[in-house]
Image (cartoon, helix red, strand yellow):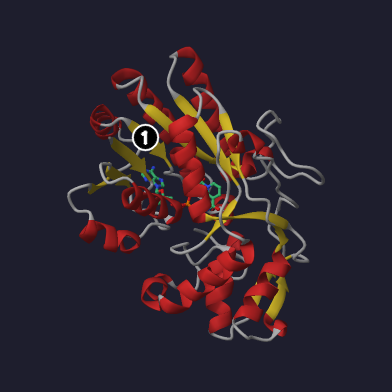
Amino acid sequence: MKMLVTGGAGFIGSNFIRYMLDKYKDLEIINLDKLGYGSNLENLKDITNKYNSRYSFVKGDINDFELVSKLIKEVDAVVNMAAETHVDRSISNPYSFLESNIMGVYTILEAVKKYNPDVNLVHVSTDEVYGDIEEGSFTENDRLMPSSPYSAGKAGGDMLVLGYARTYNLNAKITRCTNNYGPYQFPEKLIPKTIIRASKDLKIPIYGKGDNIRDWLYVLDHCSGIETVLEKGEKREVYNISSNNEKMNIDIAKMILELLNKPLDLIEFVEDRPGHDVRYSLDSSKLKELGWKPKYDFKEGLKETVNWYMDNEWWWKPLINEKVLSPTPWKLKW
Ligand code: NAD
């Protein structure tokens, strides 16, 4: 079995590659990544040494049709995680988001259609395509109503996957997960940024009143969700992935400060991001029917994550700069 993972040098991709290679001893993985700002080959240093006969890295863009076609001809499965992912950056510089999150998906679909239409393709998407919800949880049948250039681009990519799957009878599926947390997440995201700033006694910037709600999923539970869809997902179906851990941003900050024995007055409220979604919530009964269930309790997962960042300063220190730790990154020119 040979698999192409795109965007594998990022946060979720690197965790997914490690998870799959550790579990399946006859699996080979090719990781295609353009090495954008959120990526880091250090995420996979251990894997490169441990599995050098089953793991290879190709630096390249998913918009490169020739390269993507060559790789797609060689594999039995494709997991597309390559995307521009930081909502704040999408507000001041949307174009690169459309290139990767729409045109990149189109390029992959064209290559699959032409050279390997039966390949098992899982396209990794996000809860953000549904927009926010005051009460209840979105199911896969709900309408898409994105709130940012990032989520609009992801929604466009999803629509292309569904359209191509029907017209060209491709074996393509979509997963939509909630906010991930865990090791190797780029330091500009809420949880790592809070851990790093708190550990250095710096103020913790929280948007608005801190009452925005996110539904947190431990990254390895996301990996097992994608694995389930690869094995048992149906053609042209969408699967939500959530472990129903809804928390207000302010409570996340408080929990991290408590774990690090730091005072709560480090929290500082800053100007809210425009269009900031209020609450995300997904119903993942459909994936559970395929036998998936999350393993990680939020408190345990958060504690492990805090410990990982405290033990691995070598990993995050080179990534830190003023932009990454800016309290209001959406105001910057990227
Ligand atoms: P990330 O930013 O850490 O990693 C994305 C990777 O994709 C990077 O290594 C980047 O270099 C690569 N990439 C971007 N554009 C590319 C291109 N055109 N060609 C080749 N490589 C390219 O992001 P992540 O958090 O690991 O997210 C992975 C996927 O999961 C994304 O599709 C994202 O939309 C989705 N997702 C993430 C979350 C989350 O909480 N992190 C939640 C829901 C969905």
Residue under the image location 56 percent in, 64 percent down: 301
Q: Is residue 242 left or right of residue 324?
A: right
- Residue at disc 1, secondary structure: strand
Which residue is label 1 attached to?
A: 78
Q: Residues within 10 Å of mark 1 (few under 14, many from 20)?
A: many
Residue 270, x across and y down, in percent: 71, 70
Q: Nearer the viewer, residue 146 or 301?
A: 301
In the image, farthest residue toward the left: 53
Depth check: give the residue in front, 175 or 129.
175
Q: Is residue 84 visible?
A: no
Dividing the picture into quadrants, the one containing residue 241 is: top right
Q: Position of residue 287 (x, y in %)?
A: 59, 36
Q: Is residue 159 above or below residue 33?
A: above
Would residue 237 appear left or right of 262 to someone viewing this image? left
- Tag 1: amino acid: Val
Q: Is residue 324 above or below residue 200?
A: above
Looking at the image, residue 103 lies above or below residue 46? above
* Ligand 1 has an atom within 8 Å of the beta carbon of the residue at disc 1: no
Q: Is residue 270 above or below residue 173?
A: below
Of the pair 232 and 238, the residue shown nearer to us: 232
Residue located at (28% from left, 63% from top): 46
Q: Residue at x 70, y 54 (%)?
A: 274
